[in-house]
């Protein structure tokens, strides 16, 4: 059964000169999760942040830190993000040969475990992880940069995963990341997503606009 829609603003679109304040402000404006994009310049063509930044941001809010690791290998860094304050740690199905072991590692550290799928990766990639994962993340852009256009072919994948989750009977978040805005949010919600990552659409307009941005993404005018 689909859960209430939660909004996870991506700090990649925040003001890095005042990132702690931006995290606090968007949390107070109604964000449910704080989405933290971790990129290594290897698995994806961009370089962002590491555990030290997560640790520095942790005091600014008690909202869920949703850490999306676009890195390979991921295993050597899992404990560092767990210790820094991540609540959910998501790794890519494409980032390593032993993703089952990586999910086990995340769970052993007491954290919620997520699996992310790139646009070209089918829903079947998570079939044998459904008994373990707490979150499935559908990338609706190719990972690496913010501000890209939504890949509409991912709607079918979202719908397939919604059915897989419902069949499993487990409490698994279905998250979508990439090109989510006021126009595409209703489409991904209708397809079955219940967590929406929004970078540009979440942070645009500055502090005074955050609450309105979040309301519109939820589908409330």
Image (cartoon, rainbow, N blue to C red):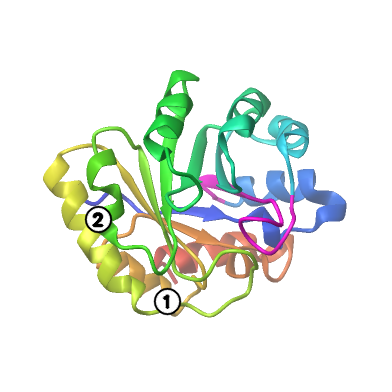
Residue 144 sits in quarter: bottom right
Magenta segment boundaries in residue numbering: 30-48
Q: Residue at x 42, y 38 (%)?
A: 98
Question: In this rendering, is residue 132 above or below 188?
Answer: above
Quadrant occupied by the C terminus: bottom left
Question: In this rendering, is residue 197 above or below 33?
Answer: below
- x and y percentages locating residue 187 in the rendered image: 33, 74
Q: Residue at x 53, y 80 (%)?
A: 149
Determine which residue is flagged by label 2: 124
Q: Specify which label sits upstream in the sequence, 1 or 2.
A: 2
Can residue 183 be seen here? yes
Q: Residues within 10 Å of mark 1 (few under 14, many from 20)?
A: some
- x and y percentages locating residue 18 in the rendered image: 84, 50
Residue at the right extreme? 17
Query: On residue 198, which mark appears?
Result: none
Q: Residue at x 50, y 20 (%)?
A: 109
Select label 1 or label 2 by which is in front. Answer: 2
Q: Residue at x 35, y 68 (%)?
A: 188
Q: State if disc 2 and disc 1 touch (CB < 8 Å).
A: no
**Front residue of this view, candidates 115 and 121:** 121
**Front residue of this view, candidates 100 and 12:** 100
Determine which residue is flagged by label 1: 184
Can residue 1 be seen here? no
Q: Is residue 36 magenta?
A: yes
Type of secondary structure dominating the magenta stretch: loop
Residue at the front extreme? 97
Residue 154 sits in quarter: bottom left
- x and y percentages locating residue 212 in the rendered image: 56, 65
Q: Is residue 154 magenta?
A: no
User: How far apart are the two marked residues, 1 and 2, measured between alpha carbons?
Assistant: 24 Å
């Amino acid at each position: 059964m689909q859960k209430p829609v939660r909004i996870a603003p991506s700090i990649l679109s925040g003001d890095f000169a005042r990132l702690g304040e931006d995290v606090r402000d968007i949390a107070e404006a109604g964000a449910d999760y704080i989405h933290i994009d971790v990129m290594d310049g290897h698995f994806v063509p961009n370089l962002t942040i590491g555990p030290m930044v997560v640790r520095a941001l942790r005091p600014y809010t008690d909202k869920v830190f949703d850490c999306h690791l676009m890195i390979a290998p991921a295993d050597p860094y899992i404990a560092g993000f767990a210790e820094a304050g991540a609540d959910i740690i998501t790794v890519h199905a494409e980032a390593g040969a032993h993703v089952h072991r990586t999910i086990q590692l995340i769970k052993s550290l007491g954290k919620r475990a997520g699996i992310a799928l790139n646009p070209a990766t089918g829903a079947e990639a998570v079939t044998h992880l459904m008994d373990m994962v707490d979150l499935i993340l559908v990338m609706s852009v190719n990972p690496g940069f913010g501000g890209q256009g939504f890949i509409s072919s991912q709607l079918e994948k979202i719908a397939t995963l919604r059915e897989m989750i419902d069949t499993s009977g487990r409490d698994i978040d279905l998250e979508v990341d990439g090109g989510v805005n006021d126009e595409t949010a209703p489409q991904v919600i209708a397809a079955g997503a219940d967590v929406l990552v929004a970078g540009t659409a979440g942070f645009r307009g500055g502090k005074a606009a955050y609450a309105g941005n979040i309301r519109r993404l939820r589908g409330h005018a």
